[in-house]
């Protein structure tokens, strides 16, 4: 570690916990466990944000942390749980890529994220210098989840993980976007989750399945 | 004066909310026509003001510079005819009993909200708020794509939701990175996200962070613009959405995605010169053109054919911006606005064909000129325009782009022209067969009111297309000079 300041160590630990939960989501087949892990990840995100707010004295980040808890750790998981119950799917049975291989690929993505952000790391604030790489790693793994899974619900979790990664990047690397921006982003994520809920509902009604691999009517 | 701007942006929102509660078909339709007229009026005021050289802002959030005014012109004009057309097309569905009055009102709510979000996007000065607004337009568009609730519409809607969320997330990260670079210079706060401030301090921004930000924005907003290889949502969404929505998606949404991308490119260009972003944009442009040209040849569904043609034209505009220089950039902008006009006309006409024949198969449709003359004429003229022939302005812009690329690298020009010939062939092979000849198919009945609305929308668009193909109006000249200026390439008219 380049700096031994306790504050930045704490921020780093929290960011790492976010990354660890991301890996846990990748290795999990049960849909409801994926949602729980996402909720846990959002809690870690809120803690990171609160830490940054405390250490820097920028108060509006507290608001963002509170919103993270309410929207991402409570409301969205509730919506997803309800979708899972109604759809009567509990497990991801067929994976496009099996779990050990997925984990290896995700390890590779972390290395990629570290090397990509290397040149701009020095721009960052001392407190949170290493978080940008972690946030990019989480974003890439989130995308990977969206691509490698077949159930609509897991794809949604992947998308939300990506959002968390971006939010970590914004909070840690840039001490948060201005408040009005963060409010807007939260609002959009919430509406997005609702719309996805509507869509999975309609897909279930029409296709009798939320297996996205059955959506092949328009292949070329 | 900024009142005109506020009217332009917020009337669609008001009209949308009103349509949600209205339960009277006639009143609802009058409201939409009124909205179209208000849009045109407010747009005229805004554009003429900016063209006369005075940019204006209302506080720190909204700001109209020539590029925004140019987008306002495009969005309000085509949005207006789109509203007239939607009244005709969706009204016919209502009359046929394919939807209820409640759904009719809801359709216009989403449709108006979609227009509002796009108009807001292009007039915001703040790149993060621009992102939020663009994301809202995506959400409205996703619901519109899946509006008809058939199996394929839902499939297309789902694909659109997932892919555009990936794109939009990437562009948000690009925006965060831009903020990361700019707050070193401008300090923490809203100013570090303001376009005006970013242009002012572009040369002081950290080049490495700027490059990374641009790459994320290119892929993210490129997804919204339908750039290959992130285009896979586009043909499905355009084919399955109700036709007025296809027209707006293709004519306007893609251009708004491109607009956001160009904002990032202009900042990058001012900081690093054209040599970094140019080749990237050029490469994606060529990839889009190539893939679209080949897929156009094998299409069996005319709405999909037009969808692939949209990918092609976004590709061409990107080639213009990628090649750069005054001619290239001007050609790109000219291409954007004319594509918006011509492609929306093509979809309006294709919607007429769909209502008349009841299916989307190219092979089975013939004799449209006799069966529904205005759709036949519209489709034929639009196809000629899309193929790059006069009187459409696309002829001019393709010529300009080819010329400017010749100065850089002649090989590119040969490649560009051969691909254009391919798309020309595809359009001229498919479309005339649909328009000319006789048919044994049975026509679906169609009410007179639908015919009037469709005719109005198609004729207004065709008139603008022909006028714009021959003349470059003075206000457009006045806008273009500073617009090309922000890419470091100043065009001059003599």
Image (tube, coloured by chain):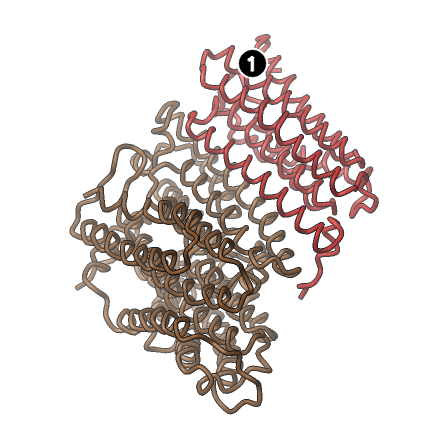
Dividing the picture into quarters, in which one does residue B360 lie? Answer: bottom right
Is B480 above or below relative to B466?
Answer: above
Q: Give the residue at x 56% y 72%.
A: B296
Q: Chain of mark 1?
A: A
Name the residue beneath numbered marker 1: A51
User: In the image shown, does A172 or B87 lie closer to the viewer?
Assistant: B87
Q: Please state the horizontal and vertical placement of residue A209, each as a whole percent of the image.
A: 75, 51
Q: Please state the horizontal and vertical placement of residue B4, each as a whole percent of the image.
A: 23, 46
B233 lies left or right of B28: right
Q: Give the residue at x 32% y 77%.
A: B391
Give the red chain's letter. A
Dividing the picture into quarters, in which one does residue A164 lie? Answer: top right
Q: Is residue B193 visible?
A: yes
Dividing the picture into quarters, in which one does residue A69 lie? Answer: top right
Q: Please state the horizontal and vertical placement of residue B350, each as a whole percent of the image.
A: 48, 73
Tell me the quarter of the image containing the N terminus of chain A: top right
Q: Please state the horizontal and vertical placement of residue B46, each as a whole percent of the image.
A: 23, 50
């Amino acid at each position: 570690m380049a700096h031994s300041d306790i504050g930045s160590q704490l921020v780093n630990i929290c960011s790492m916990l976010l990354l660890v939960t991301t890996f846990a989501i990748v290795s999990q087949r049960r849909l409801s466990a994926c949602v729980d892990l996402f909720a846990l990840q959002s809690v870690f995100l809120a803690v990171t944000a609160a830490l940054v707010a405390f250490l820097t004295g920028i108060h509006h980040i507290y608001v963002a942390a509170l919103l993270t808890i309410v929207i991402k750790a409570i409301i969205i998981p509730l919506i997803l749980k309800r979708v899972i119950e109604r759809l009567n799917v509990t497990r991801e049975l067929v994976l496009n890529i099996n779990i050990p291989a997925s984990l290896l690929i995700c390890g590779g993505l972390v290395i990629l994220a570290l090397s990509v952000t290397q040149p701009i790391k020095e721009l960052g604030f001392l407190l949170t210098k290493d978080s940008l790489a972690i946030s990019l790693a989480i974003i890439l793994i989130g995308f990977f989840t969206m691509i490698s899974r077949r159930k609509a619900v897991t794809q949604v979790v992947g998308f939300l993980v990506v959002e968390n990664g971006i939010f970590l990047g914004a909070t840690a690397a840039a001490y948060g976007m201005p408040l009005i921006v963060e409010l807007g982003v939260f609002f959009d994520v919430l509406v997005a989750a609702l719309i996805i809920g509507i869509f999975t509902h309609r897909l279930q009604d029409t296709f009798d399945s939320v297996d996205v691999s059955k959506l092949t009517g328009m292949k070329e | 004066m900024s009142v005109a701007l506020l009217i332009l942006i917020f009337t669609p929102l008001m009209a949308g909310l009103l349509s949600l509660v209205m339960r009277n078909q006639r009143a609802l339709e009058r409201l939409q026509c009124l909205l179209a007229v208000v849009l045109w009026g407010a747009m005229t005021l805004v554009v003429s003001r900016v063209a006369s050289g005075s940019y204006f802002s209302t506080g720190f959030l909204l700001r109209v510079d020539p590029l925004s005014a140019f987008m306002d012109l495009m969005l309000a004009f085509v949005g207006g005819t789109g509203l007239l057309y939607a009244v005709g097309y969706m009204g016919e569905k209502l009359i046929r009993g394919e939807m209820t009055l409640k759904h009719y009102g809801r359709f216009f709510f989403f449709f108006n909200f979609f227009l509002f979000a796009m108009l807001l996007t292009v007039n915001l000065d703040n790149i993060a708020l621009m992102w939020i607004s663009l994301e809202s337009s995506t959400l409205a568009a996703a619901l519109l794509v899946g509006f008809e609730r058939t199996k394929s519409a839902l499939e297309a809607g789902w694909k659109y939701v997932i892919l555009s969320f990936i794109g939009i997330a990437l562009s948000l990260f690009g925006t965060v990175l831009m903020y990361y670079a700019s707050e070193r210079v401008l300090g923490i706060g809203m100013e570090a996200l303001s376009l005006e401030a970013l242009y002012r301090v572009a040369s002081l921004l950290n080049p490495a962070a700027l490059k990374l930000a641009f790459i994320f924005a290119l892929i993210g907003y490129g997804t919204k613009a339908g750039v290959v290889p992130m285009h896979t949502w586009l043909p499905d969404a355009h084919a399955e959405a109700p036709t007025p929505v296809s027209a707006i998606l293709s004519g306007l949404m893609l251009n708004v995605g491109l607009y956001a991308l160009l904002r990032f490119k202009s900042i990058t260009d001012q900081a690093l010169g054209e040599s970094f972003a140019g080749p990237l944009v050029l490469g994606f442009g060529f990839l889009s053109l190539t893939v679209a040209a080949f897929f156009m040849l094998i299409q069996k569904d005319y709405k999909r054919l037009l969808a692939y043609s949209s990918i092609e034209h976004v590709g061409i505009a990107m080639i213009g911006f990628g090649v750069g220089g005054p001619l290239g950039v001007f050609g790109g902008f000219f291409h954007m606005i004319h594509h918006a006009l011509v492609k929306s006309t093509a979809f309006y006409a294709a919607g007429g064909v769909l209502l008349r024949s009841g299916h989307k198969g190219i092979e089975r449709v013939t004799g449209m000129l006799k069966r529904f003359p205005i759709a036949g004429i519209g489709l034929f003229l639009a196809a000629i325009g899309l193929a790059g022939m006069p009187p459409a302005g696309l002829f001019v812009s393709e010529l300009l782009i080819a010329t400017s690329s010749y100065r850089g690298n002649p090989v590119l020009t040969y490649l560009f022209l051969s691909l254009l010939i391919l798309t020309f062939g595809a359009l001229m092979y498919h479309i005339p067969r649909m328009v000319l000849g006789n048919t044994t198919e049975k026509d679906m009945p169609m009410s007179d009111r639908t015919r009037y609305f469709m005719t109005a929308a198609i004729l207004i668009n065709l008139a603008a297309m022909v006028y714009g193909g021959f003349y470059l109006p003075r206000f457009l000249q006045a806008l273009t000079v500073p617009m090309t200026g922000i890419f470091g390439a100043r065009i001059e008219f003599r």
